[in-house]
Amino acid sequence: MTSLDKNVGAVKKVLTSEDVLVFEFISAGGKKFAAVYADDICDKNMIGELAVKPLRDVKKGDGFDKVRMLLASPEFKESNKIRDAIKEISDGNAVVFVDGESDFCILGLKKPPARAITEPPTQIAVSGPREGFIEDIKTNSGLVRKRIKSPALQIKQIKSGKRSDTNIAIVYIEGVCPKGLPERVEKEIAENKIDIIPDSSYVSSFISKRPRSLFKRCASAEKPDVFCAKVCEGRVGILVDGSPIALTVPYMIVEDFQTSEDYYTNSYRATVLRIIRAISVLIGMFLPAIYVSAQLFKIQLIPFRLLLKISSSVQGIPLSPSIEMFLTLLVLEVLNEASIRMPKYVGLALSVVGALVLGDTAVKAGIISTPAIIIIAFSAICLYTVPDFAETTTTLRWIFLIIAGSIGPFGVVVLSAFLIGYLVTENSYGTPLLAPFAPLVKGDLYDSVVKANMYSLKNRPGALRVGDKVRFKNENKR
C-alpha cells in the first residue's frame, strides 16, 4: 500500500459519510495526488483551478517543496497529522495528499450554502441601511469590516461545540473596549462543553451570569450598523456561524428601547418615540393587573362613569374578574403561538378568525366581557412596541396578573419594589442593567430615554468603563 492510499484510508476510516469524496488525479509526469473534500460545503470548481491545474506539470521525482510552491490558494496550510486533515475536511476545506509524502496540503475552499443579504424581518427601519446578518460567519465578518476599517478592530476566531466545532468570532476595538473583557467572554464560552451550537442563543446562555434569570445579560442585533455602533461604543460583539443574530456585551436594559432609526431621524422625534415605548411597556405589563385588582379590591380606583360602563358590560359574566382576564390572556397567547407556527397564509387567516369570530362570539355568549378583550388586546400591542424586551415583559404580565388576582394592589406594589430592587443589584460584566439611571450616570442620560443631538454625544457611555472615552470631536461650539 502506497503512502497516498494509507493517508486516504486513514481519513475515510473516520469520515465514513458518503458525501466525503476522494478525487484522485495524476500529473503529466506521473505523480499521483488525491484531493479529499466534503461534497456539500467545498467549492469543487476551485479544486480544479487551484490544485489540479497547477500540479499537472509535477514530475514523479519532485518532492513536497515543489508541490507547495505550485499551489496558489490564498488560504494554504500544511500538516502531517491525520486529525488535522479530518478537522479541515469537516470544516469545508480540501486536503491534497501527495504520493510518497507524509505531509499534505490544506486548501481553504469552503463554500457553505448561504442565503443572500436581505433586510432582517424583526429589525425593520424606514430610514437607514437595509443590510442584515445572514447565517455565514465570513459574510457577517465582512459586513463588520465594511463599516469599521480601523486597524484597531480585532476579530478573534474561536471554536466551540464538541461535535459541531462551530466557528465563533469575538469582535472588539482594541483601546476602546475595557481591558480583559474579550478574554473573559472567550473564557466563559470555552468553559461550556456542549455537543452542538446551532444558534447564538446557546452562547447567550453560556455568558449569562445567571442563566435562569428572567432578564438577559447580552443584547442582540440583526443589523450590521447596530452591531458596529455598539462595538464602537466599547462593547464586545459575538458572531456565531449559522446564526443571523449577533450578540453584544455588556448589556443595559435601555438598549432595548433604542432602535437604529433613532439615530437616522430628528433627535426630538426619537425622544418622543422612546418615551412612547417606555410608557407602552409599563401599560402592557401593569394594565391587566391593575384592572383585576381594582375590580376585586379597590373599586374606587376606577372613575365613576367608567365604572358604570364596566358594570353594565360584566353583568351576567359567570367568571370572576381574575379568571376572566386569565382565560382571555391564555386565548391570546394560544392564538399568537398558533399564528407563528402555522404556515404564513394560514396563520394570517387564523389570527383574523381568532380575533374577530372567537372574540365576538365569546362576548355575545356572555362568557367574556368587552373590557377584558380591549385591555388584553391593547396590552399585547403595547408590549410589542419593544420587541426585544417582549419575551421578558410577557412573562412579567402573567406574574403581575396572578399576584393582582390573589393579593390585590398591595401585591402589585410589593412585586414592583422587589423587581426594581433585583434589577438595581444586577449587572452584565460589571455594567448595571439599569444604567444610566441606577446608578446615575449623568453623561449617559443624553442617549437614554432622551435622545440628544450628535453634538451632545461627544463621549462614549461612561457606564461601560471604556478605554478611549471620546468618540466625537468638533471644532465649532454648538
Image: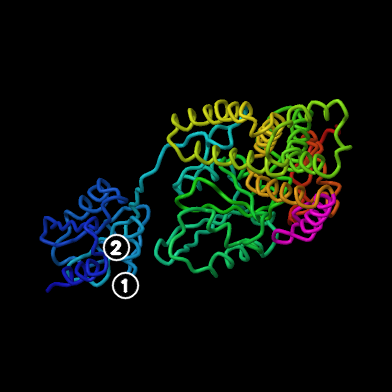
192 w.r.t. 383: above or below? below
Q: Separation of disc 2 and disc 1 at Cα?
A: 11 Å
Instruction: Residue 21: say if magenta.
Output: no
**Residue 368: x and y, percent?**
65, 34
Determine which quarter of the picture holds residue 147. top right
Q: Label 1 amino acid?
A: Lys
In the displayed structure image, the side of residue 52 where residue 239 appears, left or right: right
Q: Which residues are magenta?
A: 410-434
Q: Secondary structure at mark 2?
A: strand
Residue at image location 35% in from the left, 64% down from the top? 87
Residue carrying label 1: 81
Image disc number at residue 105:
2
Give the residue drawn at x 77%, y 48%.
Answer: 404
Where in the figure is residue 14, as x and y percent of width and height?
26, 69
- The one nearer the camera, 115 or 419, is 419
- Residue 369 x %, y %: 69, 31
Disc 2 marks a residue whose amino acid type is: Cys
Q: Is 346 on the left or on the right of 21, as rendered?
A: right
Q: Quadrant of the C terminus?
A: top right
The mark closer to the camera, 2 or 1, is: 1
Q: Which mark is residue 393?
A: none
Nearer-the-camera pick, 190 or 217: 217
Its colouring scheme is rainbow
Q: Earlier in the sequence, mark 2 or mark 1?
A: 1
Q: Crowdedness of circle 2 by 10 Å Cα count: few (<14), some, many (20+)? A: many
Residue 342 spot, x, y in % from top left = 45, 37
Along the line of sight, the residue nearer the viewer: 313 or 291: 313
